[in-house]
Image: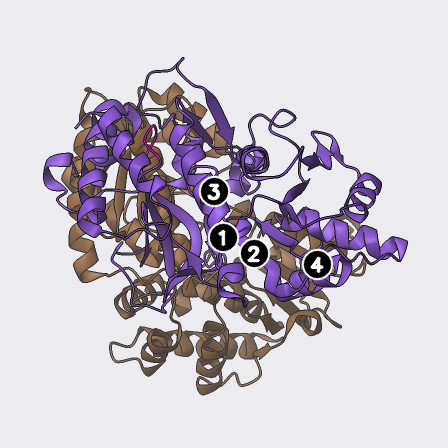
Chain colours: A purple, B brown
Amino acid sequence: MIRSAIERDVLTWIAEGVDSAADDERFNQLACALFAHQYEHGEAYRRLCDAVGRKPGNAAHWSEIPPAPAGAFKRARLAAFPPGRELRTFRSSGSSTGEPGELHLDTLALYDASLLATFDAWVCCGSRSLRFAVLAPSAAAAPHSSLSYMFDRAARVLGLGEPHFYADAEGWDPDAAIAGLGELDGPAVVAGTAFAFVHLIDALDARGVQLSLPPGTRVMETGGFKGRSRELTRQELHTGIARVLGVSTRRIVNQYGMCELASQFYEATLAAGEPTLAKRVPPWVRTRVVDPATLEDVPEGMPGVLVHYDLANTGSVLAIQTSDLGCAVDGGFEVLGRLRGAEERGCSIAADALLASR
Amino acid sequence: MTDAPVRERIERIDRALALWRDPDSPWRRRLAEQHGGYSPQVIDLGVTRGLAHWTRDVLAALRARELAQPCRVPSTTAVWLAGSVPTATFAALLLPVLAGSEVRAKPASADAVTPSLLAGSLAEAGLPDAIEIAGGEQALRDVDCVVAYGRDETVELIRRRLPPHTIFVGYGHKLSVAAIGAHARPERAAGELALDLALWDGRGCLSPAYVLVQDAPAGRAEALAAALADALERCERELPRAKLDPAEEAGIREWRAAVALEPDGRLWMPESTAWTVALERRSSLPSPGALRFARVVPFGDLDELAERCLGLSPHLSCVGQSGFGERVAQLEAIAASAGASRVCPLGRMQLPPIDWNHDGLSPLRPMLRLTDVERDESRGRA
C-alpha cells in the first residue's frame, strides 16, 4: 500500500468523525501498512526497529510496531521523506533537556484534518458562532510552535471572525488580553497554555478585576508549567480560571498533546456536561499504557508509560513512546504526570550533570 | 586514647565486620531484606567480597600510619551520606569511628537502612554508641567535623553552612572507567568487567561509566562488546539486577534509541532492560552509562586514551584495567594525570580497600587537627 493510498484512507476515517467506530481491523491494516512505509523510507526509524529486531514482516499487529521514544526526535530526523520537502517543522520546547525535538511535515492535510475534527468535537462541540481569544502567539509569530499552529488553524477554520492572539514571540500583553476579553459580546473559545492562564489569573487579581464572559464561552487549556510560572494543581487552576473569567469549571477543557504527534487528546467535559479526567482517543489513534520494563500493557487503572499510535503521523513515525505516566480508564486514559528523573540512588554522577559541567 | 583502648576499638570494629562477613550473617540477611535497592544476591556478594580485606591488621596499620603524629581527633563527626551502595556507607562511617570519633550519621534518602544496621552490628560487637542516626539539620549541630558525600552542589551547600572552625571533608561527584588494552583476552576481561558492572547495578562512583577498549587489531572492541554481552547475560542469572523506577526503565530505552540512531552504533541487549552493551564510535564520549548499561568506546592508542581520560577530569575516580602488559605504568600515569585516585585490576573496581585514598585524600588525616612538633635538637644534645 503506497503512502498516498494510506493517507486517503486515513483522511476518510477522520472525515467520519470522532464518533465513528474504533474498528480495530481497519486500524490494524492501516497501521501495518504505514509501518512498512515508514520502515522503508525512514532511515533513522529503521535503525531503531532493526536494533530491537522488528521489521514489517514480523509485526502482524499494530501493538507490535516499535515505538520511537519521544526523545529520539531530539537526536535524529525521524521523517519518512527526503530532506528539503518540509512544509513545516514543529519544534518541542526542549524544556527538560534544553534541546528541542523536531517534527518534520511534508503535508499538513492529515495534521489539519485530525486537529480540526477533535477540536470541533470536544471544544467547539459543532458550534460555528464562537470567537477565539488565544493566550499564545499566532502561527505567523511562532512558525515552529505546533501549539500556535493548532490554535491558529482551529480559530481560522472553526471560529467566527478574526481571532485575537494576545501574545507574540516576545511575550504577552496582559492589558490587551484583559481588555479584549472584557469586550467579548458573544460566546468564545479562550485558549492557551496552563502557564498562560496562571499569568492571566495573576494579572486580573493584581488589577482587582473579575470578568464575566458571555454565556456559551468555553476555555481550553493545555500543557504543563515547565518551570515557567508558579505551579498550581489542576483543581486550583480550573477554580482560578472559573473565578476570574466567570466561566463554570464544567466549561473548561484540558487538552493533552505533544509536538511529535499530529493528533491531540481532549477531555470530554463539554460533551459530557461535567468535568472528567479521561482523555478521549479518536478512532484513528490508539494509546497503550505499558510497563516500561517490559513494554507490555499494564492492567486498566494501573499506572504506566503512555505510548501513542497515530495514523495521522504519516510523514514521521506513527508509534511514539512518551515520557508521560498515565493509566487506562473507561473511555480513554488519564495523564498522571511526567516521568520524573528518578531519585539519584547511586553515587555516580548523573549523566546530565556531568555533561553540563564539561 | 592510650594504646589499649585503641586496640580494643579496632578489635570491636573487626568483630562487627566479621559479623557481616559470616557465611550465615543475620546482619547481611537483614540488609538484603530491608534495603530494596538491590537484589539479595548482589547485596550478599557485594558485602562479602567488599569487606573481605577490611581486617584487624589492615585497620590497625591504617590507624597507626594516619595518626603517627600528635593530633586532635574530632569528638563528634557528622557524616552526610549519599547514594545507596552499602559498602561505601560502611567505609564512610567506619573511618571516623576508627579514628576515635563518635559519629552522627545522616542517612542518604536512597538508603535509610545500612547506617542503622551497621550501628547495630557495632553495638553487638561492643561499640554501642559509635554511631548515632540523625536527621538533616540536626546531624550538623554541635559537631567539630563534617564529612559530606553527594552531588557537588550538595557538598558545597553543606560546606557553606558550617561555622568557620568546623573541619570539613567533602566528596563530590565521581565516575570511573574500565580501560582494556590490546593484550586483554576478551572473554576473561568481559567476565571481570561484568562483575564490576553488576555489583551495585552500576550505581556506584566506582562503577565503570565507560568501557574504553583498545581496538587493535581492529575488531577487538566489537569482540569485547559481544563477550561482555554474554557475560552480563550470565551475570543476570546469578546476580539479578534490582527492579528500577519507571523513569529509569524509560531512560534505558531512550539511551538504547540514542545508540541505535547513531550510524555506526551497535547494541547487544535482551528484550528486557536488564543489561545493555552499546558500542559507540564517537569523537566525543557519550553520556555515562549506569544501571548495567555498558558504553563501550574504542580507542586507538594510549594518547587517545589519555585524551578520553583527561576529558573526564576532575570527575574521574577509578580506572579498572586489563591487558596493558608492559605499558601498565603508562596507563597508571595517564590515570594519575587525569586525577584518578585509584587504578585496579578489572573485576576489583567495586572492592576498594578500606585504606584507599578516596578522591586522593588520606583516609583519616583530613578529619584530624594535626600538630607538628619541632624539637630543639641542640638543647637536647647539651
Residue at mark 1: chain: A
Label placed on residue B124: none
Q: Earlier in the sequence, mark 1 or mark 3?
A: 1
Give the number of the mark in front: 3 or 4: 4
Left or right for A219, reference B298: right
Residue denoted by label 4: A241
Give the number of the mark in front: 1 or 3: 1
- Residues marked 3 and 2, same chain: yes
- Residues marked 4 and 1, same chain: yes
Range of magenta residues:
A313-317
Cα distance, mark 1 to mark 2? 8 Å
Residue type, label 2: Val
Left or right for A253, reference B220: right
Q: Are marks 3 and 4 in contact (CB under 8 Å)?
A: no
Label placed on residue A253: 2
Q: Are marks 1 and 2 in contact (CB under 8 Å)?
A: yes
Give the number of the mark in front: 4 or 1: 1
Residue denoted by label 3: A258
Q: Earlier in the sequence, mark 3 or mark 2?
A: 2
- Residues marked 3 and 4, same chain: yes
Residue denoted by label 1: A122
Q: Are marks 1 and 3 in contact (CB under 8 Å)?
A: no
Q: Residue furthest left?
A: A57
Q: Earlier in the sequence, mark 4 or mark 1?
A: 1
Residue, x 76% and y 50% (percent of image)? A200
Residue at mark 3: chain: A
Mark 4: give few (<14), some (14-19) or many (20+) Cα within 10 Å.
many
Cα distance, mark 3 to mark 4? 23 Å
Cα distance, mark 2 to mark 4? 11 Å
Nearest to the observer: residue A292 or residue B179 = A292
